[in-house]
Image (tube, rainbow, N blue to C red):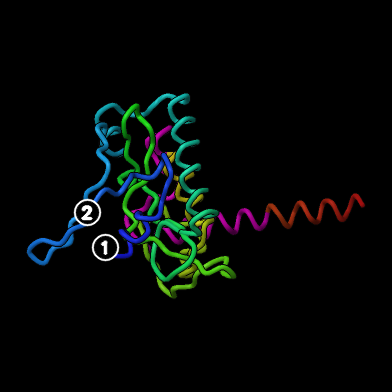
Amino acid sequence: MRVQTRILQRCESPNIAKLYDVFEKDATLNIVMEYAPFGDLWSLLSRQGVISERSASALANELLTALNYLHTVQRVVHWYYPPSHLFCSDVKLENVVLGKDHVTKLIDFGSAVELHEAEQFLNVGEIRGTLMYLAPECWNGIYSPASDIWAAGILLCFILFMTVPFNCATREAQRAKMRAVEEMHDKFFLNRVYYYILII
């Protein structure tokens, strides 16, 4: 919780929910944040189903603007913890809310990670995060800004089609499905390389 408040206190982006106050009462840390009158994306989709491509395009632009701000200005990944630069890695429907005028805002930095200047990724040695949004490298315990972009892509797929490409009942089944796609991609890549060698 304290990591989240520290990150939010220094964020100044129209697409990240503002932090107004932090106080402790009855041994509980309380956070007062910007009001999001239209709720989170999960609730919105539950009420009305898929949204239009135009709305999805605007949402994607605002979500990626928030992630770009975190990755380049704050160096945060929206996912885990230690200091200097941020990435998110818990980008999901429940962590994206719609504020006034339906402006997309990112919330919940409880899992965010700060990268040091020289770091491009963080190896935490274990799998963390919501399964259906996990990027391939996360299965090896590696998290980076690219992990957030992957998760944003999964989120956008869901809001347009109400399904995700890698949604399985168990962690093992999902990993097996992703491995199959990786192998297919590798074979395609090798075949293309072989083809270009032949024509050269």
* Amino acid type at image mark 1: Met
Q: In the displayed image of the protein, which residue is found farthest to the left?
A: 26
Q: 200 or 99, which is in the foreground?
A: 99
Q: Quick check: is 170 in the magenta stretch? A: yes
Residue located 37% across and 35% down the image: 162
Number of callouts = 2
Q: Secondary structure at mark 1?
A: loop
- Where residue 24 appears, as percent x and y from the top left, is 15, 62
x and y, in percent, of residue 134 in the image: 43, 57
Depicted 161 relative to depicted 200: above or below: above
Percent across and percent down for residue 152 are 46, 46
Left or right for 200, reference 97? right
x 47%, y 53%: residue: 70
The residue segment tinted magenta is: 158-187
Say whether residue 162 is left or right of residue 187.
left
Q: CA distance from mark 2 to mark 1?
A: 9 Å
Q: Residue furthest bottom?
A: 125
Splitting the image into 4 quarters, where does residue 47 fall? top left
Disc 1 crowd rating (10 Å Cα; few below 14, some 14-19, many 20+) is few
Q: Which mark is residue 90?
A: none
Disc 2: which residue:
31
Name the secondary structure under disc 2.
strand
Question: Is 199 a magenta residue?
Answer: no
Q: Nearer the viewer, residue 112 or 54?
A: 112
Between circles 2 and 1, the one closer to the viewer is: 2
Sequence order check, earlier mark of 2 and 1: 1
Disc 2 vs disc 1: Cβ atoms closer than 8 Å? yes
Q: Which residue bears the numbered disc 1?
A: 1
- Going 76% across and 51% down the picture, which residue do you hit? 192
